[in-house]
Each structure stands twice: as C-alpha cells, then as structure tokens.
Image (cartoon, rainbow, N blue to C red):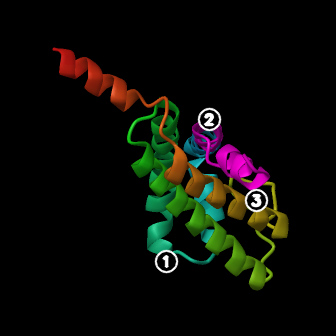
Amino acid sequence: MNMMTQLKAMLTHPYLALALRLYIAGLFVYAGMVKINYTAEFAETIASYRMIPYWGVNPMAITMPWIELIVGIMLVCGIRVRSAIAVAGALLVMFTVSIAVNLIWKSPIDCGCFHTLGDTIGWKTLVRDIAWIAMAAHVYSYDRIFRLERKIEWIAGEM
C-alpha cells in the first residue's frame, strides 16, 4: 500500500466518522441545553444578528435549542444519522453565514453558541464553524457503524 492509499483509508475510516459524529453530537446537546434554560437571553442574541425579522426572533429562540438537542441525541444514539447530520450541517451553515455577514458588517456581537452572553464573534469563530461543517460532511459521507436503528430493525426482524 502506498502512502496516499493509507491516508485515504485513515480519513475515510468509519471509526473516524463515529468519533466526529459523537463530537458534533456533544456540541449540539451542550448548546441546546444551555440555550433552553436561557431563552430570553438567547432571543436577544438572535436579534443582535439583525438577520431575522422581529416577529421571528422569539419563535426561533424557543425552537432552535430543542432542535439542537434532539439532533444531538439522535446522533449519539445513531438514529437516522444521515438525516440528523444533514439538519446539523444546515444549522451550522446558517450559523456560519450569520457570523460571516456580521463580521463583514463589523458588528461587535456575542456569538450565542454555547453561552447566551459573553463570547464575541471573530474570525476564529468563523473558521471553527467551517471546520464543523467539514466534520458534518465527513459524517454524512462515511458514518456507517454503531447505529441503534439497525439494531432495532434486526430485533424486529426476528419477531
């Protein structure tokens, strides 16, 4: 095996995809749990991005943390992984675009990623989110092990 073949085998290995899946799942579970407890502060953060109409801020502040939590739990459990990681990837793209636009506008706003207030957005935040999008794409493409849904289908098939 040449070096490129070995590198490709390592980068496409299902255990790497599993590790990335669990990492992203942890991010989403943690982010969702923090925001659920502080909905009003999270609504202020969403409003500070100036990308959502005022009538959509509160519904988004209420529903987004629950979506993040459910997606994270689905990824941890291995239930509908491709669907869950597609939703996670779409959310990450939305977050990244929002951060990029506000960086271009030079808005000194808080990220709202894991704490409702406190961490100001910057280019480091943007690069981090782009890395997470790449991880989500990897999971979407190569994850195929340790899925609870397959165990359920197997048990149901024996009955």
Q: Residue at x 35, y 31 (%)?
A: 149
Q: Which mark is residue 63?
A: none
Image x and y of residue 39, in percent: 56, 50
The residue to which callout 1 is attached is 53
Question: Which tag is nearer the camera, tag 1 or tag 2?
Answer: 2
Where residue 81 sits: x, y (%)? 44, 43
Q: Is residue 64 above or below residue 104?
A: above
Left or right: residue 67 compared with residue 23: left
Along the polypeptide, which appears first: circle 1 or circle 2?
Answer: 2
The local secondary structure at tag 1 comes to loop
- Residue at the disc numbered 2: 15
Mark 2 residue element: helix
Q: Which amino acid does label 2 sit on?
A: Tyr
Based on the picture, tell me whether residue 22 belongs to the magenta stretch. Answer: yes
Q: If you read the primary sequence from the N terminus, does the residue marked by circle 2 or circle 3 appear first?
A: 2
Q: Residue 128 carries which label?
A: 3
Please tell me which of labels 3 and 1 falls first in the chain: 1
- Per the model, the C-alpha gap separating discs 3 and 1 is 27 Å
Q: Residue at x 64, y 53 (%)?
A: 135
Image quadrant in which the N terminus is located:
top right
Assess disc 2: are there few (<14), some (14-19) or many (≥20) residues with their C-alpha within 10 Å of its C-alpha. Answer: some
Neighbourhood count class around disc 3 (C-alpha, 10 Å): few under 14, some 14–19, many 20 upward: few
Are the residues flagged by discs 2 and 3 in contact, CB closer than 8 Å? no
